[in-house]
Image (cartoon, grey):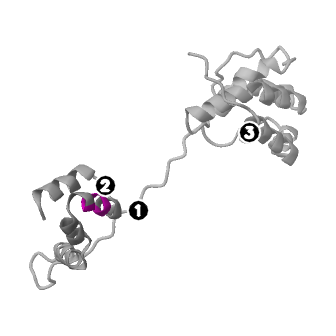
């Protein structure tokens, strides 16, 4: 293979052999044909087999050991520390009091900045929905505090069965989804 062809292969730096052969064809048709040839593939596979599986009579012969399985992800503990101060002796009396907390809580589960922006844009919808759903004051205080849980499920931390039933109801769940899908993400405010 020519130096020019080898340089092209190195410069292409690609795992897509078809794309490399296609590009190499513009540099040198003969070298592209060689790279695509069965004989080169057979020789290459032979070298790999010999290196990976030496002759079993050889003192260097090794037995195959499968790679170790990847460790299971460690489930972290949720962060229950409120992001915003909430006075337990004062009732939550409007949806506005829930917006920052709900955005903080939902954003802690976000996969990326785009998803955080979606939650920020949906904040008012989420807070209105939660406020009107009939949650207990204890649950509303939890939402207003906006603990950045980041793992697990919000429902696990709700104070009673009634609140959990509301959170898990198909209607409420669908309305949560509607809040986040029927919104246009806006830039997050600078911290």
Instruction: Please indicate, yes or no, whether residue 132 appears anywhere in the rendered image.
Output: yes
Q: Is residue 149 visible?
A: no
Q: Say few, some or many: other residues with alpha carbon within 10 Å of mark 2 (under 14 / 14 to 19 / 20 or more).
A: few
| Horizontal arrangement in the rendering, residue 109 relative to residue 54 (left or right) | right
Q: Which residue is mark 1?
A: 69
Q: Residue furthest left?
A: 59
Task: Give the labeled residue for mark 2.
Answer: 14
Residue corresponding to mark 3: 181
> Which residue is at 75% across, 22% downward?
99
Residue 125 percent across, percent down from the top left: 80, 28
Q: Nearer the viewer, mark 2 or mark 3?
A: 2
- Measured Cα–Cα span from mark 3 to mark 1: 37 Å
- Depth check: give the residue in front, 128 or 31: 31
| Magenta run includes residue 24 | yes
Q: Residues within 10 Å of mark 1 (few under 14, many from 20)?
A: few
State the residue at coordinates (84%, 19%).
Answer: 92
Q: Position of residue 16 (x, y in %)?
A: 34, 60
Measuring from the top left, give residue 46's x and y in whole percent.
19, 78
Q: Which residues are magenta?
A: 21-25
For the point 21% across and 53% down, which residue is it? 8
Of label 2 and label 3, which has the lower sequence position? 2
């Amino acid at each position: 293979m020519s130096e020019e062809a080898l340089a092209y292969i190195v410069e292409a730096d690609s795992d897509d052999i078809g794309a490399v052969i296609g590009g190499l064809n513009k540099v040198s048709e003969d070298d592209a044909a060689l790279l695509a040839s069965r004989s080169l593939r057979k020789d290459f596979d032979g070298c790999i087999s010999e290196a990976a599986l030496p002759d079993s009579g050889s003192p260097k012969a090794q037995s195959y050991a499968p790679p170790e399985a990847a460790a299971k992800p460690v489930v972290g503990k949720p962060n229950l520390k409120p992001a915003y101060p909430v006075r337990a002796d004062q009732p939550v009396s409007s949806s506005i009091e829930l917006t920052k907390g709900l955005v903080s809580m939902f954003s802690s589960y976000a996969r990326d900045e785009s998803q955080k922006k979606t939650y920020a844009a949906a904040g008012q919808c989420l807070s209105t929905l939660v406020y009107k759903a009939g949650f207990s004051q204890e649950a509303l205080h939890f939402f207003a505090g906006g603990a950045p849980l980041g793992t697990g499920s919000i429902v696990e931390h709700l104070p009673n069965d009634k609140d959990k039933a509301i959170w898990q109801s198909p209607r409420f769940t669908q309305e949560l989804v509607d809040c986040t899908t029927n919104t246009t993400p806006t830039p997050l405010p600078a911290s």
